[in-house]
Amino acid sequence: MKKLLFALFSGIFVILAFSSCKKYEEAMYNKSDYQIKYIWYKSNSGEPNETFTYDKKKMLTQIDIVDSAHVGGIRTEAFSFTYNKDKTVESITHVNGDMTETVNFTYLNRYVKYMTYSINGDIRLTCNFYRDDEKAAKITRIVEIYDRQFFEDMQLYRAPALFNRFIGDYAKVEEMAAAHTKDLTLYCTKNITYDGENIVKIEEDYPDIHKSILTTIEYSSVLNPYYGLNYCYDDDLLGYSKNAAGRKTVSTFYDGTLTNAETTEYDYIDVNKDNYPRVFTYTTGNNSLVHFKTYLTYVKEYKD
């Protein structure tokens, strides 16, 4: 669930109004008063673990992460956002010494078509989005193409912060890069299934390592504050579902044989008047008796 929080990076929160006769759309900029301002883990006392900064047009400009384990807290990461003229997100950047990580977005008819991940200007990953007919335009498939040789050498760096926060799990890519293949690129294909306005199934296939991952999601009645945020890609395409997850099961297969299955349960114990979460707990895997807690404060409520 920490990934769920990390996906929060995204701050331009959108509430979309849909009806069955309306064309599916992805809003890329804020239309809601419920932009996240602060996030705390474990306790909402002391300095927030995550702080979101907006400009006068309600556009998210930066997310600062604080390591609360240090006395007084220290800023450990900062992610900066830039925008196109139509308010769609152009890029997200993280700078750490001599390494600059960047995620760039390319759109077609305001839908994300490509997402690229670069280090120091060199593209190391491309994500291609495929969609169904123009009437619905929901994502049906995503193909990820990795620069294998580069990721083989990533032990020279610390695990890249922006990659882990917005793109995926570095440990998973490390496993791919260790595959016995002479290919210069590695592939992952994700097949997406919706039920209404929520993604209920993601099927990932990693042919180079004979691995597949099946994620199934059941939803609560609570609304998802990340809905409409196209760059909430990590944590199972968090930005593409209208409701907040109630239960998620991730099953891992090697050569078609189930090797692990882990279920996460979410409990939204405090929501605001418009049904957005303020406080939630979750339990996961072997920690089913441990309830992890997260606190969210929104801009509107913070000002009030």
Image (cartoon, rainbow, N blue to C red):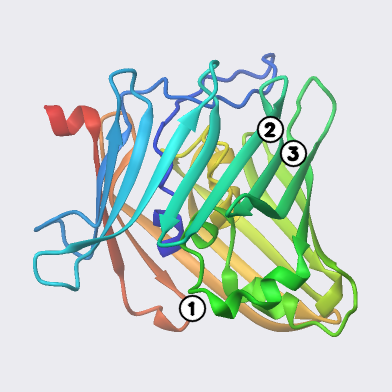
Q: Which amino acid is tagged 3?
A: Ile
Q: Quadrant of residue 57?
A: top left
Toward the right, the furthest residue is: 182
Residue found 67% across the figure and 19% down from its top: 20
Foreground pick, 153 / 168:
153
Label at residue 139: 3
Residue tagged 2: 106
x and y percent of residue 302 in the render? Answer: 16, 34
Element type where label 3 sits in the image: strand
x and y percent of residue 264 in the render? Answer: 48, 67
Label 3: how many Cα within 10 Å (few below 14, some 14–19, many 20+): many
Task: Tell me if residue 164 comes above or below residue 222 in the rendering.
Answer: below
Q: Which amino acid is tagged 2?
A: Thr
Circle nearer the N terminus (2, 3): 2
Describe residue 191's horizontal placement relative to residue 158 as left or right. Answer: right
Task: Tell me if residue 228 comes above or below residue 25 in the rendering.
Answer: below
Q: Nearer the viewer, mark 3 or mark 1?
A: 3
Q: Contact (CB < 8 A) between labels 2 and 3?
A: no
Label at residue 62: none
Residue tagged 1: 285
Describe residue 207's horizontal placement relative to residue 66 as left or right. Answer: right
Circle nearer the N terminus (1, 2): 2
Residue found 83% across the figure and 32% down from its top: 132
Q: Nearer the viewer, mark 1 or mark 2?
A: 2
Residue found 32% across the figure and 30% down from its top: 34
Q: What's the CA distance linking mark 2 and mark 3?
A: 15 Å
Element type where label 1 sits in the image: helix
Q: What's the CA distance linking mark 3 and mark 1?
A: 29 Å
Q: Nearer the viewer, mark 2 or mark 3?
A: 2
Residue found 54% across the figure and 47% down from its top: 238
